Amino acid sequence: MAVRLGDTAPDFQSDTTQGPISFHDWLGDSWGVLFSHPKDFTPVCTTELGLVAALKGEFDKRDVKVIGLSVDPIDRHEEWNRDIEETQGTAVNFPLIGDPDRTVADLYDMIQPAASDTNTVRSVFVIGPDKKVKLTLTYPASTGRNFDEILRVIDSLQLTANHQVATPGNWNYGDDVVIVGAVSDEQAKEKYPEGFRTLKPYLRLVAQPKVPALES
Ligand code: BEZ
């Protein structure tokens, strides 16, 4: 069954390139990104894993643990990692799940038979510290994902979780944000003594609260 927004992310035990894990324990109190790849030794996946390795510091700043998956076994991942380091200039610095029996792929509905009977699609799950699923994305094998966009969504999700604000279309870090409806005008006046703009009673904008870890 599909994993939907707000569901508890299914827990599992698995072997990874950094040793066996129990997923929820491995996440601890952090945010998480679980993302799948169709297959080892494929070109688009090779570029994606190099990219995520290069962005690891950005995920760390946001207290997000990243973990990849493909249905190939660990020894194949390890062999492939050498190619990733050679061609992308960055060694894979996060765990890759080996899932040859498709336990995790099936739990997260990552095999979509009309696309491929054997390979996982490019799924992304962002999971909050409460283990709830905050974002799902599904891309076809032929399109590499934009990991800057995944970081952008994480910034939005964390602002919502910590500051009761939402982010408008095409928002980027530093742009004004939306005060959520659950915050009354009276509460907003207290919360934002420097003011906010009311364009409509349901559309109130305010300067984005700063996130210290992202300001340097
Ligand atoms: C790739 O990563 O390049 C890829 C994987 C499976 C099918 C098509 C492309």
Image: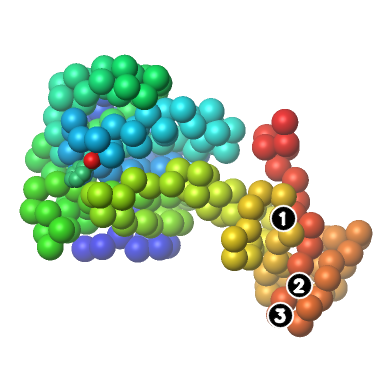
Task: State the residue position of label 1.
Answer: 175
Q: Is residue 172 left or right of residue 198?
A: left
Q: CA distance from mark 2 to mark 3?
A: 6 Å
Residue at 55% in and 33% down: 58
**Residue 18 visible to the viewer:** no
Give above or below for 75 relative to 199: above
Crowding at mark 1 (Cα within 10 Å: few <14, some 14-19, many 20+): some
Where residue 6 sits: x, y (%)? Answer: 42, 62
Task: State the residue position of label 3.
Answer: 202
Residue at 59% in and 61% down: 170
**What SS does tag 1 mark?**
loop
Say which of 16 and 141 sits in front.
Answer: 141
Q: Quadrant of the N terminus?
A: bottom left
Q: Residue furthest right?
A: 194
**What SS does tag 2 mark?**
strand
Q: Which mark is residue 204?
A: 2
Residue at 24% in and 35% down: 43
